[in-house]
Image: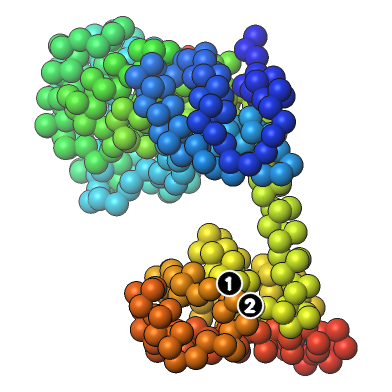
Amino acid sequence: MFDSLSERLGSVFDRLKRRGALTEADVGEALREVRVALLEADVALPVVKSFIAEVRQKAVGTGVLRSVTPGQMVIKIVHDHLVSTLGAEEAPLDLNAPSPIPFLMIGLQGSGKTTTTAKIALRLKQKDRKKVLMASLDVARPAAQEQLKILGEQAEVATLPIVPGQMPVDIAKRAMQAGRLGGYDVVMLDTAGRLSIDEALMAEVAAVRDATRPHETLLVADALTGQDAVATAEAFHKRVGLTGIVLTRVDGDGRGGAALSMRAVTGRPIKLIGTGEKLEALEAFHPERIASRILGMGDVVSLVEKAAETIQQEEAEALARKMEKGQFDLEDLRQQLRQLKKMGGMSGIMGLLPGVGKVKKQLSDANLDEGMLGRQEAIISSMTPRERRNPKIIQASRKRRIATGSGTSVQDVNRLLKQHQQMAGMMKKVSKMGKKGKLPPGLA
Ligand code: GDP
C-alpha cells in the first residue's frame, strides 16, 4: 500500500523542531515527498512538475502555526492548492439554451461513456425535471446501440429508435430532429469510443459536433487512467473542444490523479463523478475529497485549520482584554485592519466582547471596503511607534508628514484618527455596559 504523505512528511520534519517561516530548504525537502505522492497517485508527470513549482512559490516564507509541524503546514498548502487547481467552485451542467439542448458524450471505449450517458439522463429527468432523449452513435460496436436502449428502459428515458446501417452524423441529425418534434429538453448523443486516441475517431466526433453544435461536450474518463490521462484529455480537447469532464470509477481504489491531470491540461471543470455501476451512482464533484485522496492523508488539513482558528482566537482574546481596559491604540487598529483584510475579522473580535450585536454589523460594514482598508493601513504604517501608542501627539506637521508618507491626504489622516477615537470610545463603553449587565436588550 501507499504510505500516507502525512506520515512520510512527518518523519522528514520530526527532526526539525524549529518554528517560524518555512525556509526554502524545508519546502524543498517536503516537496520531494509531495512529488512522489502525486506520482503514486498517478498524476501525469508534466502536471506534477508545474504543480510543484506553483506550490514552492506559495510555500516559501509562509509562517508555520504554533501547534502544527512544518510538514503538516506544507501539506495544508499543497492541499489548498490542489483544491483550487481542481476547481473550488461547483460546475453544474449548463442547461441554459434553447430546447432541445444537445449534449455530446465523448471518451475512450470502456471509460463508462454509455453508462454515464444514461446516468446523466436519469439525473436530468429526476433532478431537473427535463424530458431527455438519448441516441447512440456507436455503429462500430454492434451491441452498443442496444446497450443504450436497455439502459434507457431501466432509467425510463427515451432512446432514439435504431435504424440499422445509418452513419453517426446522420443518426445525430435524426436525433436532433426527433428532439425538436418530440418536445425534448435535452438530446444526449453517445459517441463511439476507441481503445486509444485515433484520427478516425476524432474526425467522426468532430463531424458530429459540427452537425449538432453541442451545448455541453463532456469527456467521460476513467479515474483509474494513469499517465495517459493527459494525452487523452488533451487530444479530445484540442480536436473537439470540451465543456467539462465526467470522471468515472471514482468508487475504485485509484488515487484520483487523473482528475488533477485532466483538469490541469484542459482547464475544464470536472462536472460530475461516477461512483458505481448503478444508474443512480452519479454525484457532484467535491475537490476536497479528491485532494485528500490524492495526498492519501487523514486529518492533517482539519488539524491545521483548527490550529489557525485557535491562534486567531487567542489573538482576538488578547485584543478584547486590551479594549476592555480602553487601551486600543493605533497599533491594534493596524493589526485589525490587516486581519479585516484577511478574513473580515472585526466581527470575530467584537463578538468576544460581552454583548455586541448591531454595533458589530455597522462597524464591519463601515470598514470592509478593501481599498480603504489598504489606505488606512498605509497611514498607520507611516506613523512612528510613539505616535501609534499615543495618537494625541499627532498635530498638524505630523499629519502632513504621515499623509505624504502614505500617499494620502491630511483629511484621510484626520478621518482615520477620528475613526480610531470613536472605535476606542465605543469599545470601552460597550464592554463596560456589558460587564455591568446594563446593555440595552437590542444590543445584547
Ligand atoms: P463505454 O464503453 O465507455 O460506453 O463504457 P460502458 O458504459 O459500457 O461501461 C463499461 C463498464 O464500466 C460497465 O460495466 C459499467 O457498468 C462500468 N462503469 C461505468 N461507470 C462506472 C463507475 O462510475 N463505477 C464503476 N464501478 N463502474 C462503472
Q: Position of residue 91 (x, y in %)?
A: 40, 44
Give the colouring mode of the picture: rainbow
Which quadrant does the C terminus fall into?
A: bottom right
Residue 363 visible in rendering:
yes
**Residue at x-position 71% and y-position 61%:** 315
Q: Is residue 99 above or below residue 193?
A: below
Q: Horizontally, is 32 left or right of 95 in the view?
A: right
121 or 426: nearer the viewer: 426
Query: Circle 2 sits on which residue?
Result: 389
Q: Is residue 131 above or below residue 389?
A: above
Horizontal and vertical percent for residue 191? 26, 21
Q: Are marks 1 and 2 in contact (CB under 8 Å)?
A: yes
Q: Please report the residue visible at 68 percent of the width from the left and 27 percent of the height from the top.
A: 16
Q: Please tell me whether residue 354 is drawn above or below residue 19 in the rendered image.
A: below
Q: Which mark is residue 276?
A: none
Quote the CA–CA distance across marks 1 and 2. Answer: 6 Å
Taking 161 as reference, is 20 left or right? right
